């Protein structure tokens, strides 16, 4: 089991040197949305990805495979992004992940049932500042708007403890996220997308506890960045706040541009390359079991997973 270690500031000399040494056009670049690409807003519908970040993401998409792995539904995330990534996975990994399509309707039914139970247990939710948000295949219970947040959180946790069946609960910033226990998490999603894109390395940036499912993997082929300070994390690097995301994206794009100039004789990056590689593997790979949360498999090959901290599982 890997413990919490001191993170390195990514925009320091050491951090930038490590960034330049790690990335290349065959790296899958993945990002969370709320609190990472977009500043946290008062309400779920109020977020906005700044235009400069949209432009930097569009540039990155043209240079390397890019994914968004978010707690929002895919449709909602696409509405806010302003750019369409090559891969878009929603509901903390439960929606839009190749190989899991046959399970999504089961996840959707669970979300609907939890929503109905919560409304019965918290009938005056909106008046108390508690908002139950059904995202399709997961449910988030927000209490940011409550006058007394500790009391609201206690009420929310009490209601969650009485849900049938019990969800996997991952807390966030004044929110409790309810996920099907059988659903893939963000760590599973990232590894599966890397395999599908034909990428040996993955770069991931996130800001919340659901992103720790990626950070706790602690694998040498992953470059992990936590947005925000003053929090315990298994990420290797950190940014001070969301305002530094644009500078990070510019460093990434500049580094990829320099690599392209040096290696131009080898041919440019093709946005279709990874999917073409996956297609060439034929029907046999399609029969492989999808990733499972808890004991990860990559195209049928078992890979080691850090046991992690059970606090947020």
Image: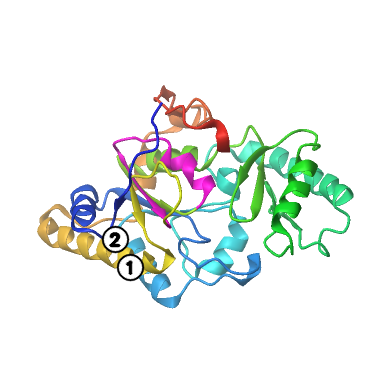
* Rendered image quadrant of residue 51: bottom left
Q: Is residue 159 left or right of residue 106?
A: right
Q: Is residue 114 left or right of residue 5?
A: right
Categorize mark 2 by other alpha carbons within 10 Å: few (<14), some (14-19), many (20+). many
Q: Nearer the viewer, residue 120 or 267?
A: 120
For the residues labelled 1 and 2, say whether their Cβ atoms are less than 8 Å apart.
Answer: yes
Q: Which residues are magenta?
A: 208-228
Q: Is residue 172 left or right of residue 249?
A: right
User: Vertical placement of 104 versus 204: above or below?
Assistant: above
Residue 102 coordinates in the image, percent (x, y)? 64, 37
Which circle marks residue 63 in the picture?
Answer: 2
Q: Is residue 202 magenta?
A: no
User: Vertical placement of 57 versus 141: above or below?
Assistant: below
- Marks 1/2: CA distance? 7 Å
Which circle marks residue 59 in the picture?
Answer: 1
User: Vertical placement of 265 versus 195: above or below?
Assistant: below
């Amino acid at each position: 089991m890997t413990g919490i270690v001191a993170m390195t500031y990514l925009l320091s000399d050491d951090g930038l040197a490590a960034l330049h040494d790690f990335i290349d056009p065959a790296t899958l670049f993945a990002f969370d949305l709320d609190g990472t690409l977009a500043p946290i807003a008062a309400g779920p519908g109020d977020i906005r990805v700044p235009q400069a970040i949209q432009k930097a993401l569009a540039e990155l998409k043209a240079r390397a495979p890019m994914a968004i792995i978010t707690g929002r539904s895919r449709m909602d995330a696409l509405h806010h992004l302003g750019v369409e990534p090559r891969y878009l996975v929603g509901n903390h990994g439960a929606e839009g992940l190749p190989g899991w399509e046959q399970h999504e309707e089961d996840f959707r039914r669970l979300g609907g049932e939890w929503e109905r139970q919560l409304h019965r247990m918290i009938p005056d939710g909106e008046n108390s500042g508690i908002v139950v948000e059904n995202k399709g295949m997961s449910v988030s219970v927000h209490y940011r708007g409550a006058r007394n947040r500790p009391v609201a959180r206690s009420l929310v946790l009490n209601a969650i403890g009485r849900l049938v069946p019990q969800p996997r609960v991952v807390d966030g910033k004044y929110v409790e996220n309810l996920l099907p226990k059988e659903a893939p998490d963000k760590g599973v999603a990232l590894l599966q997308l890397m395999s599908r894109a034909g990428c040996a390395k993955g770069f991931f940036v996130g800001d919340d506890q659901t992103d720790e499912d990626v950070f706790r993997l602690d694998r040498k082929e992953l470059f992990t960045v936590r947005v925000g300070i003053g929090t315990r994390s298994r990420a290797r690097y950190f940014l001070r706040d969301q305002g530094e995301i644009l500078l990070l994206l510019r460093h990434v794009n500049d580094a990829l541009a320099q690599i392209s100039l040096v290696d131009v004789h080898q041919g440019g990056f093709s946005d279709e390359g990874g999917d073409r590689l996956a297609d060439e593997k034929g029907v046999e790979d399609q029969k492989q079991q999808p990733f499972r949360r808890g004991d990860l498999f990559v195209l049928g090959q078992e890979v080691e997973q850090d046991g992690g901290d059970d606090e947020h599982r």
